[in-house]
Image (cartoon, rainbow, N blue to C red):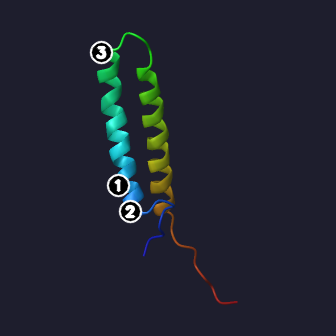
Amino acid sequence: MRSAGFLSERQRRLAWVGFFLAAFQAPLAAKLIDDASWFFAVVVALVVATVIVADDAQRRRPEPANYPE
């Protein structure tokens, strides 16, 4: 059995939804708004993506072996 990450399944699903919303909102806002406020959506998407990648890395770690002494 693989070790669980630090996100629950529900949190992981919400992180993916948040990532996709921010990733799709950024180019739309860049096209519709003249200032650079769309850049905030890019930063949010990158932060959420980093959390998802870190959770994946923790989930893929092998469980520590418990050797009897």
Where does label 2 land, which residue? Answer: 9
Give the CA separation, mark 1 to mark 2. 6 Å
Q: Is residue 43 above or below residue 5?
A: above
Front residue (pair 55, 9): 9
Q: Residue at x 53, y 72 (%)?
A: 63
Q: Earlier in the sequence, mark 1 or mark 3?
A: 1
Q: Which element is circle 3 on? A: helix
- What is the x, y in percent for residue 11? 41, 57
In the orientation shown, which residue stands out farthest toward the right?
Answer: 69
**Which quadrant: the N terminus?**
bottom left
Instruction: Please state which of residues 13 and 57 is positioned toward the viewer in this rendering.
Output: 13
Q: Relative to residue 20, is residue 47 drawn left or right?
A: right
Q: Which mark is residue 50?
A: none
Tell me what residue is drawn at x 29 percent, y 22 percent.
28
Q: Give the residue drawn at x 45%, y 55%.
A: 56
Q: Earlier in the sequence, mark 3 or mark 2?
A: 2
Q: From this viewpoint, is residue 60 visible? A: no
Task: Give the residue number, with chain letter if any, for mark 1.
Answer: 13
Q: In the displayed structure, does residue 26 sit left or right of residue 65?
A: left
Between the C-alphas of marks 3 and 2, the distance is 34 Å
Relative to 15, residue 46 above or below: above
- Quadrant for the C terminus in the image: bottom right
- Do residues under tags 1 and 2 come within 8 Å of each other at their CB atoms? yes
Residue matched to label 3: 31
Mark 3 Cα-neighbour bin, 10 Å: few <14, some 14–19, many ≥20: few
Q: Is residue 14 above or below residue 10?
A: above
Q: Amino acid at mark 3?
A: Lys
> The residue tagged with tag 1: helix, strand or loop?
helix
Q: Measuring from the top left, give residue 4's x and y in whole percent.
A: 47, 67
Q: CA distance from mark 1 to mark 3?
A: 28 Å
